[in-house]
Image (spheres, helix red, strand yellow):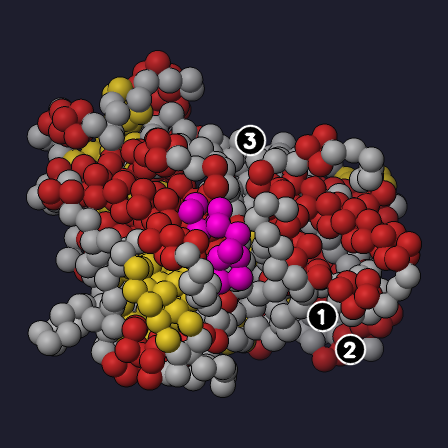
Amino acid sequence: MEELTLEAPLVLPERGGVQVQVVVEEPDAAGLRPVAVYSCLEDAESADDAMWNCHARGLLAVEEPSSAVGGGVVLEQWPPVGAEVVMSDPEGFYAGFVERGFGYGPAFRGVEAVWRRGEEVFAQVRLPQECAAEAERFGVHPVLLDSVLHAVALIASDGDEEAVRVPFAWSGVRLHASGASVVRVRLTRAGSDAVALDVADAAGQPVVSIESLALRPLSAEQLQVAQTSRYDSLFQLDWQPLESPRASAAGGSWALVGPDVGLGEAVVREGGSYARYQDVSALISALDEGETVPERVVVSCPATGADGDMAAGVRESLATVLSVVQRWLGEERLFGSRLVVATCGAVAAEADEDVAGLVQAPVWGLLRSVQTENPGRFLLLDHDLDHDPERGSEISPAAADAAVRALVAGEEPQLAVRGGIILVPRLSRVTKSAPSQASTPLVSGGTVLVTGASGVLAGVVARHLVAEHGVEHLLLASRRGPDAPGAAELVADLEAAGASVTVAACDVADRDAVRELLAGVPAEVPLRGVVHTAGVVDDGVVEGLSDERVRRVLAPKVDAAWHLHELTRDMGLEAFVLYSSAAATLGAGGQGSYAAANAFLDALAQHRHAHGLPALSLGWGLWAQASGITQNLSEADLARMARGGTTGLSTEEGLALFDVAQGVGRGVVLPVRVDVGAFRGGGVSVPALLRNVVRGVVRRVAVGRDGSGVWRDRLAGVAPRERERLLLELVRSQVAVVLGHADSAGVDADRALKDLGFDSLTAVELRNQLGAATELRLPTTL
C-alpha cells in the first residue's frame, strides 16, 4: 500500500448498523490503483436516501515478488540490548486511555510490555486467546494491528494530555508474512508528526513494515463529531400523508369560534353537531346560561395585517391567541374539551413551499410549547388557501371530512391540509445520496455580519468563520458593541487569526439603526453574509406570560430578522443564516414566547428559500457549552430535557453541523442530539414528531416500580390506609423524577414543593407525570 489517508473515524450508531464498501478503481499509467472506504447507515429507507461517507482514500501498488524477499527488520534479540522497561503494567497503561475518554475492551488490550532505548520504542503485543485461532485468516489480524498502534502513544506526544495520537496517513506499508499471534514492535520517529514501524513475529522475523505513519491528536469530543458526518444529529421536518384514523365515535359536539374554515358542515356529515360563537367570551357566556360544554372547540387565528408592519402583525396575532389559551386554561368547565387552533399557511408542508401566512407562523411555536405543558388539550390545524371562488378560503369538503375524523381520533396533535390531503409532521435525519464533500466557505469574500456578537455562540461561530471558512472581514454587532464583556478578547483572537474586525453598537430590532449599520459597510468589501444569533429569553409557563413579556422576546428575533431580510434583500448576499431553536418545532415547556419567536425565524428562512434568496435557519438543540440562553438551566431543567431525548451538543459537534447544514439545500434544519435510548425506558411516550426517528418503541405510561399495571388500578384495590401510603410513594417518586434525583430517598414528604426547588415549570411537569402515571387528566390548578 503506497499511501492511505484516514478522513473520518467509523463510529457505530447507537441503533442499527452500517454498511461498509471498499472501492478499488482501475490502475493509472504507473500501475497505482485508487482505493477508498465508505460507510452508510443501515436504516436508509431506500438507495436514494443512502448517504455514503468516505473514511479513507489511498493508492495500492503491485509488489514485485522479488522485492519482498528479505525485506523488513529482524528483531531476534528480545528484549533489545540496552532497552529499559517503561511499561510492564498493561492495566495501568490502558487506564490512562480510559481517563481520556477512549475505552478499549478486553480484546483490544494487547500491549504487554514496552521498552525504550534512546529515540526507539519497543513493544510486545499479543492477540487475546479467543482470537489466536483466527490469526491465520489474516495478513495481520485487525485486533493485533490495532493493539500495535497503541504503543505509538509512548513515542509521539505534543503535550496535549487530553488527546490520544491516532493514525492519519500511512505510506510505504508492506506485508512480509502472515498469521502471527504474538509480535515484537520497533517504533522510531519519521519526522515531527510521524513514526516508522517494524513488526516481527515471536522469532524476530519480519511481518509488517511501515515507512511512515503520520499522526494527529484526537480527543474524545472529536470522536463524537464523527457521527455528525453521517448527519445523525441533523434533522429536517417532513410532512407525510396521514393514514386513515382508526374508527372512532361520531363527530360529537363542537363549537366554532370566529370564521368557519369549512369544518362545520363536515362535523354534521360525520354525525356531530356544532354551534357558532364570535369569540371565546361568547362561548363562556353560553356555558353560563346552561349550554352543553362542547367536546372540541375550533378557534381560527385572525389574519392580521397591521398595515403591512410584519412585526406588529406577529405581536397582534400572538396576543390574540395567547389570550384565548389563557382564558381556556382558566375555565374549569372546559377541562375535558380540546381546543383546535386553525391557521392558514403558517407552516411549509413541502420542502420548497412558501409560508404564505408568515404572520401566523409564531402561533405554531407558541402552541407547540403549550402542547408540551398541557398534553392532550390542544391541537393545531393549518390549511392552505382554496382557490375555488365559491368556497373562498374554506377547506374542500373531502379534506374537511378527513380533518374532522383526525381531530376526533386525537392521535395527531398537529395537522396540515394541502390540496385536499391531510398531512402530519415527522422529524427525519437529513440525508444525501452522495458521499459528503468538504464544506465550501460560507461566502466567497466581502464582509460577514454577526449579530448578537456579545453572546457565547456568536463568538464561537465568529472564530469558526475566520479559522475554517476563511472570512477576512467581520462586522460584529451587539447592543453594547465594544463595551460588551469579552468583546476586546474576541476581537484580539479574530485579528490574530488574520481577520479585519469592526465592532458596532446596534440594536438590531431598530430598523433605522440596522439601516445605518449596513450603510457603514465599505464598498470595497461589501456585505456578503449575515449570521443572526441575537436573542433573549424570558421563560415561563403560558399562564404566566403577558403581552409585554412576549414582545421582549420577539424583538431581537422577529423585528431584527425582518429588518435584516428587507434591508439586505437587494445586496446580493451569499448567506443568510438565522440561529433558531428546536423549541420552535419540538415545543418546550416554559418557553412559549421563545418558541414563537424562533418559529418566525424558521418561517422567514423558508419564505426566502421559496423565493430563491439565500437562507438557512438552524433550529439548534441544547449546546453543552453554557450560553446566555442556557446558563441558568437547573439540574431539573437538564433532567427534563434528557428525559425528552435531548442531550447537549459539544462545541466541535455544533460547528461541524453548522458546516454540514450549509450544503443541505433546505431552508430549515435542526441540529439536535437525540438520545433514542431515553424513550426505551418506562414512563416516556414517543412524541408524534419523533415517530420516524424513534422506531419500534411501544408507547408506555408511568407505572409502579414493579411494572404491575397503572397506579389507578393499584390504588383501587387496597385498603384506605395502604392507599394513602401508595399515593405518597407515587408522588415522591414522580417528584424525584422531575427534580432529576436517582430515587425518592431525598424527597422529604413534610417539605413544601417550593422548598424542594419547584417552580412553575417543574410544577407543570409534575402534574403531567402524575397524570400519565394514573391515566387521569389532572386540572391545571393542581
Question: Residue at label 1?
Answer: 141
- Of the numbered discs in the image, which one, if any, rests on residue 632? 3
76 sits to left or right of 61: right
Rate crowding at label 2 as few (under 14), some (14 to 19) or many (20 or more) other CA atoms within 10 Å.
some
Q: Residue at x 15, y 74 (%)?
A: 391
How far is mark 2 from mark 1, CA to CA? Answer: 8 Å
Relative height, residue 95 to residue 6 (above, below): above
The reply to whether discs 2 and 1 touch (Cβ–Cβ < 8 Å) is yes
| Residue 643 percent coordinates (x, y) | 63, 53
Query: Please, what is the three-letter code of the amino acid marked with disc 2?
Result: Glu
Q: On the image, which quarter does residue 454 sit in?
A: top left
| Residue 741 percent coordinates (x, y) | 75, 43
Instruction: Work out whether residue 69 can be spotted.
Output: no
How far is mark 3 from mark 2, CA to CA? Answer: 55 Å
718 sits to left or right of 75: right
The kind of secondary structure element at disc 1 is loop
The kind of secondary structure element at disc 3 is loop
Q: Nearer the viewer, residue 368 or 222?
A: 368
Q: Nearer the viewer, residue 100 or 180?
A: 100
Q: Nearer the viewer, residue 109 or 706?
A: 706
Question: Residue at label 2?
Answer: 134
Query: Please, what is the three-letter code of the amino acid marked with disc 3?
Result: Asn
